[in-house]
Image (cartoon, rainbow, N blue to C red):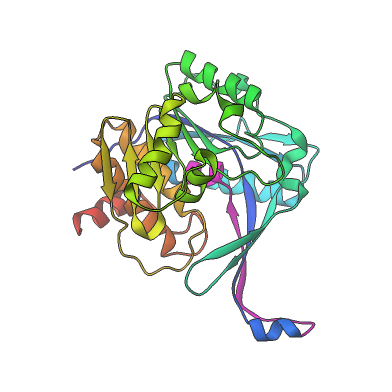
Amino acid sequence: MRYNGGMKILCAGQAVVDCITRNIDKESLKNRSARAESIRLNVGGDALNESVILSRLGHEVQTACLIGDDLAGMIILNALKENGVDTSFVQTEEIDTVIADIFAEEDGSRRSLNSNAVKLGGKSLSAENIRDIDALSLASLFRAPLDDPKKVLELVVKAKSEGAYVFADTKLPVYKKLTLEDYAEVLPYIDLIFPNETEAAYYSGIFGDKEEDLATMADVFLKRGVKAVVIKTGEQGSWYFDGKRRFHHPAFAAEVVDTTGAGDNYAAGFIHAYLNKEPVPVCMAFASACAALSVAASGATGGVRSLQQIENYLQKK
């Protein structure tokens, strides 16, 4: 099976610099100078991650994000340009570019530390950036710069006026309490949303990890107008619900190095296959392959390198 790129996609949301510390020596934390296996800088953030992966899969990608006029902002711009992403709609503001401290454990699990910079000074993205696109991905819905429902509504209305698909990946709010009710006008414009199980539980108010629990979580989104829901459940794979159909795809086995950005890689892979009109189970398989390659490498964009790589991977499964 051959997948084609070439779609025009705008990825909107967070772009950050990740400082990833792997395997801290817990015993050494008692000292003034602690030790870790490695400390590396990587670019990250949902919009950046999706943009880079979709560009490597052959699409014409633009990124809409907010950065500061500082060193971290320069790193983000350079990374996007090096990966063939159009940075015309990156907004440089008088803010601190977000730098996230991520602590990765030996089993691949991680914790993150955020500062006030994640609020991006309360600034939002402009809907004027949306024109002549096939798809809009709200890569970090509920997190700045997508934490103002009125501004997000302007984005999705403009995208639909262009005839574009609208996708959304979700984040948990950090400094601002937000609910699905706040986004009641936005949700009917979303063709497909990608929460993980924690996010789905938080926004739906439904808890549990059984299939029917996940289906009930998805129903909350569907009843608010979202056309379809994919719930990512890590090692347990992913579930698709649209009110009429449901599918499950197990996660591909992988030697886990770093789970940072795995969900973004999944979303990018699903969007790629979906825009190629593939059946939902095929979209889930392609997305799962992207996620598996992602967790086997350090950094959010270190695993997926090309479309051919994914095709070769899937042929072996």
Quarter of the image for residue 69 reads top right
The picture places residue 218, in percent across and down from the top left corner, at 40, 37
Quarter of the image for residue 243 reads top left
**Image point (60%, 37%), residue name:** 142
Q: Tell which of 33 and 213 is nearer to you.
A: 213
**Image point (33%, 37%), residue name:** 241
37 versus 6 height, above or below: below
**Image point (35%, 49%), residue name:** 238
Kindly tell me whether residue 121 is visible in this rendering.
Answer: yes
In which quadrant will I find the N terminus? Answer: top left
Q: Is residue 124 magenta?
A: no
The picture places residue 309, in percent across and down from the top left corner, at 31, 54
- Image mark count: 0
Q: Tell which of 186 and 64 is nearer to you.
A: 186
4 versus 250 height, above or below: above
91 versus 175 height, above or below: above
The picture places residue 30, in percent across and down from the top left corner, at 74, 84
Q: Is residue 50 magenta?
A: yes
Q: Tell which of 48 and 78 is nearer to you.
A: 48
In which quadrant will I find the C terminus? Answer: bottom left
Q: Which residues are magenta?
A: 31-52
